[in-house]
Amino acid sequence: MKVRLSLHFPASVQMSQPYNQSALILILLLFTFALISGCDPTSSDEPEQEPDDQNQQYDPGVPDDYSDISHIDNFSSWGHYNVHDPSMIKYDDYYYIFSTDVFFGGGGVDEDDPRRDPKIPIRKSDDLVDWQPIGHVFDEMPGDVIDFMREIQPDYRPLAVWAPFIKQVGDEFRLYYSVPANNDLQTAYLGLATSPHPEGPWENQGLVLATYDGDEHNGIDPALMIDRATGRHWLFHGSWQAGIFVVEVDPETGFRLDEQDKGEIVATRPLSNGSAAMEGAEVLYRPENDMYYMFVTYDWLMEPYNVRVGRAEQPQGPYLDMFGKNLADHTNNYPKITAQYRFSGHYGWKGVGHTGLLNDDGDYYLASNGRLGGPSPNEHLMLLHLRRIFWTDDGWPILSPQRYAGVPQIDLQSEDVHGRWEYISLNETFSKNDPLFITLSSDGTVNNNSNSTWNFDGTDLILNLEGRESFTAKVIRGWDWENDRVTLLFSGLSSDGIGQWGKKSD
């Protein structure tokens, strides 16, 4: 424990006076005795350390358990909370996130409470760290959505607007959104709203695409990509029923060029029980290598959610994974860049998927939802996970192991990476990936084992661990959310396309 002693005396106390010198000595002795007597040597094996300035500066101050503010009356405090299926955009000097309407614990009110009407929440930030809810896209579910649904389900109840996607087209902002029927994910309404500004006002433009029971796929999880070479607009949609489809839309209106066209398949998986088990596709253009990257999320949203990536030379595909396999060929694809995980001292995270992507002038970010792992306060607590995207030398995305907190990057030296690390390989999908503790010794060995080595050139860390394949990782500074401090991190890919994460723990 560090102690700062600051004594203030009135101006009338002159240190040249002998009796005041004696009084000062007596006060200091008494104060020192009180400090010694007040210390409990059994309270901790290690001395408590006061946070340094940088730890105070970058601490996001976002507790994981928000159950005490989960009532819907606390909406203005849900900056990182109740976030699912985020879509992200930057306009002027601000960032915006649009997301699915979700409420932990139902927001503390009944389903028929008007405060739970599906409206699409909007969050705003000037630094990607501090997020403030600022309102909603709609005041209530658009009437034409309800009319459409009640022609199919007379007792339809407006319970959810799912997975909105935001895109600026010229001076207009276009927000695609999807509404599933009650207990029927095959039947869906995919709509469009427009606005001159991300904060609104928003005007609903109506139905873009509908799917029905018996259709090959479902019209949810929309995302738009514009071809940089041709200016053509491509709308992605679909999920579990058959996979991801893409259809061309009119750049002037945002609606389909051909009203009968529901698109062509661009990504799917081997069907199991009639399901392709993938959703939430979004495409990112990377000008550094003139490629389009499709991020898709595999499996069930609670535990095994995990993100895979393919890339293409044009928005409509074909998208190939890092082994040259077509994402549309009913295969499982790689790289796999998220999965459920746990660093020490924490419950861990699961459900890390359904991505929102942003290129902020060459800095790339991925937003997703994350659920607390178990045993935890509640696995239905949903938080925003926003991470930096980095790139391997051959152009594949890798993610920071930790959420973004604005920690700046600095030049690193070999001695900076010496020490103890927690290392996670994201191999497992249906169980949590726990850390392995390794020590990078100053002699270039790992755990003082001459058969395990490391090398760092200021950017790339090459790890060769005995019994495992070697891999190359990017080393970065970031925020240690488990221990509330700035630390070093690494992220890379194994040769079989599995994300490799590390966090320095000393």
Image (cartoon, rainbow, N blue to C red):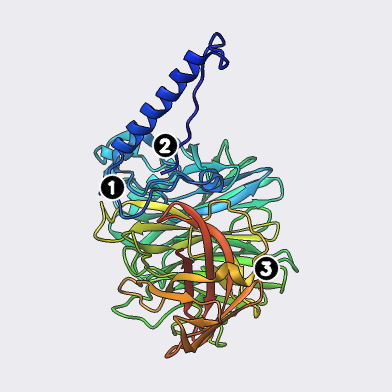
Residue sitting at x 66%, y 45%: 91
C-alpha span from label 2 to label 3: 34 Å
Tag 1: residue type? Pro
The residue that mark 1 highlights is: 41
Mark 2: amino acid: Ser
Q: Amino acid at mark 3?
A: Arg
Quarter of the figure that contains the N terminus: top left
Q: Which mark is residue 327?
A: none
Name the residue at the front extreme: 18
**Residue drawn at x 35%, y 75% as measured from the top left:** 429
Task: Name the residue tied to disc 2.
Answer: 77
Q: Secondary structure at mark 2?
A: helix
Nearer to us: label 3 or label 1? 1
Classify mark 1: helix, strand or loop: loop
Tell me the residue that label 3 is attached to.
Answer: 286
In front of the other: 185 or 402: 402
Left/right placement of residue 407 relative to residue 429 reads right
**Residue, far top:** 12
- Determine the residue positioned at 26% across, 41% down: 111
